[in-house]
Image (spheres, helix red, strand yellow):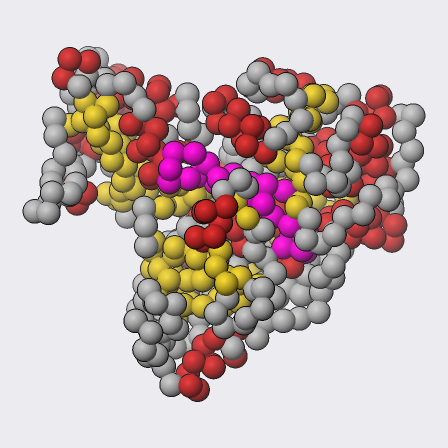
Amino acid sequence: STLPLLSDAERVFLTVELNDTKVPYPRDGAVHRLFEDQAARRPDAVALIFGDDTLPYGDLNSRANRLARRLAKAGVAKGDFVGLCADRSMEMIVAMIAILKAGAAYVPLDPSYPSERLAFMIEDTGIRLLVISERLRKTLPVTKAMIIPLEKDTAADEHESDANLDVEVSAADPAYVIYTSGSTGLPKGAVIPHRAVVRLLFGAEYARMDETRTFLQLAPISFDASTWEIWGALLHGARLVIFPERVPSIPTLGDTLRRHGVTSLWLTASLFNAVIDQAPEILSSLDELLTGGEALSVPHVRRALDKLPATRLVNGYGPTESTTFTCCYTIPKTLAAEIRSIPIGRPIANTTVYILDGGLQPIPVGVPGQLYIGGDGLATEYLNRPELTAERFIPDPFTGGDARIYRSGDLVRRLGDGNIEFLGRTDFQVKIRGFRVELGEIEATLAGHPSVREAVALCREDRPGEKRIVAYVTADRQAKPSAADLRRFLEARLPEYMVPAACVVLDSMPLSPNGKVDRAALPAPDDAIRGDEFLMPRTPVEEALARIWAEALGRDE
């Protein structure tokens, strides 16, 4: 395993020359300080747009300063973690900036998450103070943390100074913590430093970021695509349009893009596919469209290139642990007829990537291997998980010193032109609608049901381009749960995007000759879930509705 597969020249080309991505950028800058620079330079320029309301950079900075002083008086200090539970709004952006100005890091608490999961995140981060929208208070679990209502900040802060704070924050200090699915049944918090965010946004060639641009803030702040949307705009003096709906609808998306002249947009691959299928014309005014989060559909990309000739399309790839984007690929206007996937491209500025075998040896062009990521975009750690941190963030064998690389678990290969092709996973992690899901976490949660003996979760693609999670369980014969029971059990413990589309109760798991669960032999859910809960149509209207939905969902019944 230690024998090299490459000549010295090939090794240098793949590990050094293709990783020559260093460019100057404000490496020692903190996120909020770079925002303050923009506010000082153009205080009257519009920073935020929400519906009919606008907020200039100077006013946004003043409001954030006043809230930051109130947070400091409440005991927030450098190095603290502050919970943030809010819908998309101007107040949410004010709070994010204020938390950073106080020297703390923000921890997004998605109000759609189950109470049990939110309670774990609050305990794991040691949050002592929460900034929360008043209407969302009931979504939070019981906590001893101090609560500051977000909507009341203006009246409460009027007597506070609106001058910038003098809290010393270094580029290595945490900016935010985002929790991702964990294979053990508990989510894990990736701690992202200021430098990693700044590296994402400066020296970049994958997208234009300057004061002429208008970004749309569409992603939840618990999803790290929001890092590019929010700070990509505010650290460059651009406009940030805040999307009004929690779950985007295509008509509202089209109206927002057109009404506010949005130039730069990020869409998950699933939402991109839906828009291209239903109303591609709503994207025609965009200068550039970034999409990704999971493998792109080649037919949808072809249609987008045909329908959006003036829009630059970019495939953006990157795990949370490497701060939103690791590699990007500008999709050419014409795709080769034989192309089978859209490459993820090459590393962005101040980022390195290696494709290695099991012995951490570089492998030749065209050979599949695991992607390892280095550079200034890496997370500091998994919070309170030193063993997992040491397992996934390892010393960089090619750079030396204290440099690290992240073991991504993604299977890729280098193409002849130097770009990278994504092939899949080396484990049971999947991407659903842009969110990372550890199937092991679903299995571990199901195993906690009192009537479940075994549990297996799969990501199935029984129809091309339509991924869905399916759970299979064997159960206690005396207390056999229904699929609806299992779903309710999971909904109380997992985020909505992790709840399987179907739960199938089996008498026994199919086994391979070596005695392990034969995942390939598990039945398609449509063949297994009818059971006692299936109700046949009873009237002509029900028959018509059932036929329409069966066709739309690709099911026989």
Q: Is residue 157 above or below residue 391?
A: above
Front in this rendered view, residue 33 or 539: 33
Residue 103 position (above or below residue 547):
below
Is 276 placed above or below 142 here? Answer: below
Residue 51 shown in magenta: no
Q: Can residue 199 be seen?
A: yes
User: Which range is magenta?
Assistant: 176-198
**Residue sitting at the far left:** 513
Exactly how many numbered labels are in the figure?
A: 0
In the picture provided, is 265 more to the left or to the right than 187?
A: right
Residue 526 location, x and y as percent? 19, 32
Image point (50%, 46%), residue name: 386
Residue 530 x, y percent position in the rendering: 17, 23
Considering depth in this image, is 196 or 310 the residue closer to the camera? 196
Q: Left of 257 or right of it: where is 54?
A: right
Q: Residue at x 59, y 41 (%)?
A: 177
Horizontal and vertical percent position of residue 404? 53, 61
Along the line of sight, which residue is nearer the eye, 502 or 14?
Answer: 14
Q: Quadrant of the C terminus?
A: top left
Residue 185 forms part of the magenta stretch: yes
Regarding residue 290, the answer to whether it shows in the image is no
Q: Quadrant of the N terminus?
A: bottom left
Residue at screen point 15% across, 36% down: 523
In percent of width and height, residue 257 lies at 62, 44
Along the horizontal axis of the image, is 156 left or right of 514? right
Q: Quadrant of residue 492?
A: top left
Residue at figure coordinates x 82%, y 28% from the top left? 73
